[in-house]
Image (spheres, helix red, strand yellow):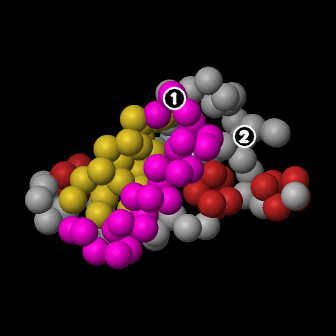
Amino acid sequence: MTRREGDTSNAQYKLRLFITGSTARSTQAIDNMRRICAENLAGRYDLEVVDVYQDPEATKELQIIATPTLVKILPEPLRRIIGDLSDRERVLAGLDLAPFGEEEKAR
């Protein structure tokens, strides 16, 4: 698998997932992200889930305007992925784990 700039194969990931309450879309985003992390980042990630209803101040620093939003804080560069995270290939590309479309080519 070809990596984008910089090798992230051993990098520790710091991820923050912003959700709004316990809606179906929020629950789906959490489940999707936990599955992607377990399959692709086992032991190399810290996933923090932030409910913007309970912690509205947390949205200011990263300028969150929609939920669910996943923010990849580390490794740099910072990236945002908006939505329920059901498009696995798009999420992997956003995390720099595979160039967009590479997963489809491998099948």
Name the one closer to the observer, 3 or 103: 103
Q: What residue is pinned by disc 2?
A: 4
**Of all residues shown, which one is farthest toward the top?**
10
Tell me the residue at 68%/59% (across/down).
89
> Is 13 left, or right, of 102 in this rendering?
left
Distance in Å between CA atoms under marks 2 and 1: 18 Å
For mark 2, does the 10 Å Cα neighbourhood hold few (<14), some (14 to 19), or many (20 or more) residues?
few
Relative image position of residue 80 (x, y in whole percent): 45, 56
**Residues rendered magenta in the picture:** 20-45
Residue 94 seen in render: no
Residue at left offset 25%, top offset 53%: 50
Q: Nearer the viewer, residue 2 or 103?
A: 103
The prevailing secondary structure element of the residues shown in magenta is helix
**SS category of the residue bearing label 1:** loop
Horizontal arrangement in the rendering, residue 99 relative to residue 52 (left or right): right
Q: Which three-letter amino acid code belongs to the residue tagged 2?
A: Arg
Question: Which label belongs to residue 44?
Answer: 1
